[in-house]
Amino acid sequence: MRPLLLTLAAASVFAADTSKLRIGELAKAGEAMEVANVPALAAEAYARPHTTEVPSPVYRLSDISFLGAERKEKLDLYFPSGALSADRPNRAAVVFIHGGGFTGGDKAEYRSASVSADLCRAGYVVVSCNYVLGSKTKEGVWPQNIADCRNAVRWVRAHAKELGVDPARIAVGGGSAGGYLALMVGLSDDRTGPGGDPAAKISAKVSGVIDMYGVINFAKHGKGEVPGVSAEAQQAYLPTYQADMRDPPVLILHGTADTTVDISESDELAAALVVAKLRFDYIRVTDAPHTFDLHPKGKGWKRDRIDYDTTGVPGMGKDSSDKADVTAPTLEFLSRTIGK
């Protein structure tokens, strides 16, 4: 693959809107470079002392083109501090997809930046991507939005060497609309599913999926059906119909007080994963609303792990906590699926 031109933008050393997250920029605003130059910049981050606690910073390359010069959608790269280990010279990666009802949102919004920084601080290279936005009646949106997210995974795998990433250890995650898109990337076929590319030479398959309060059933909450698709083909756009035992494990995170995407949608997904005999973890945050990062905070909030027996009956799991923070189960899930 020929060198790809990158455009990198940075507002300041630590952007104002993410100052509490301690995200440092590795390039000056408007600076252009080739992917081959990325390792040297990543080395700047790896050379700094690493801790897992804030305010230990992470380092970002912003607004990188990954869909072609004609596309305005970009991605951000997050690199952790701390040297690579001799026995594992490449890091695992997570592609994170923002929410916004499929019509808005951005890769650098606070929630996406917060989750990306937390995962990066834990040692992962994180890729936060944009995708085409618009209503379901707008031509060129569906299933291009799914295709864009698949192509973010392909881009990471194609440039794994330059990024210092192990191409066999990539997970995908997202919140709300991004949760849905992450599920479609992980559960539907990357060649024949919606937004798939039968001619692709690089795989978009992943080894784990993090679904944060994602949309599951488009018939609910006024979402409607995807237009221009036959009634028979609608099932191809529903994650519950795409899951089978060959798919990667799934982590579901959802708040019980969600009034935007009712928690019953995650219950529906969990039941489908039981039928598919697909391994998954389901963490419910008591009284949490729709949007939260890995540190949901509220009076009386706590997390409960929901386990399903062989008959599909839900019960309380062993990972319950009187703390709502979901960082620990998320990192445990990633450690199990793509390693540390």
Image (cartoon, rainbow, N blue to C red):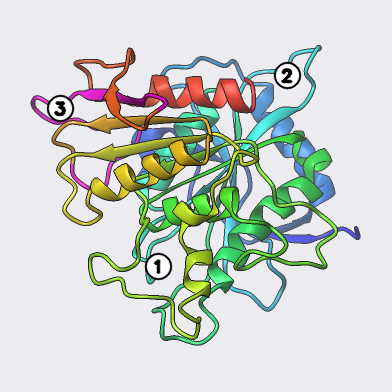
For marks 2 and 1, the one nearer the N-term is: 2
Query: Where residue 9 sits: x, y (%)?
Result: 58, 57
The magenta stretch spans which residues?
289-310
- Residue at x-position 70% and y-position 18%: 83
In this picture, is 221 found above or below 276?
below
Provide the secondary structure element on which disc 2 rests. loop
Q: Is residue 136 left or right of residue 28?
A: left
Q: Quadrant of residue 261?
A: bottom left
- Residue 294 in magenta stretch: yes
Q: Could you say which is closer to the camera, residue 279 or residue 292?
A: 279
Query: Was residue 155 drawn as part of the magenta stretch in this picture?
Result: no
Please name the residue that numbered disc 3 is placed on.
301
Give the Cα distance between marks 2 and 3. 37 Å
Query: Is residue 58 or residue 71 the one in the foreground?
Result: 71
Instruction: Provide residue 100's location: percent of width, then percent of height.
Output: 35, 62
For residue 249, which quarter of the picture? top right
Q: Is residue 256 visible to us here?
A: yes
- 2 or 3: tag closer to the N-terminus: 2
Residue where numbered disc 1 is placed: 102
Amino acid of disc 3: Trp
- Check disc 2 and report the residue beneath it: 84
Q: Amino acid at mark 1?
A: Phe
Q: Secondary structure at mark 1?
A: loop
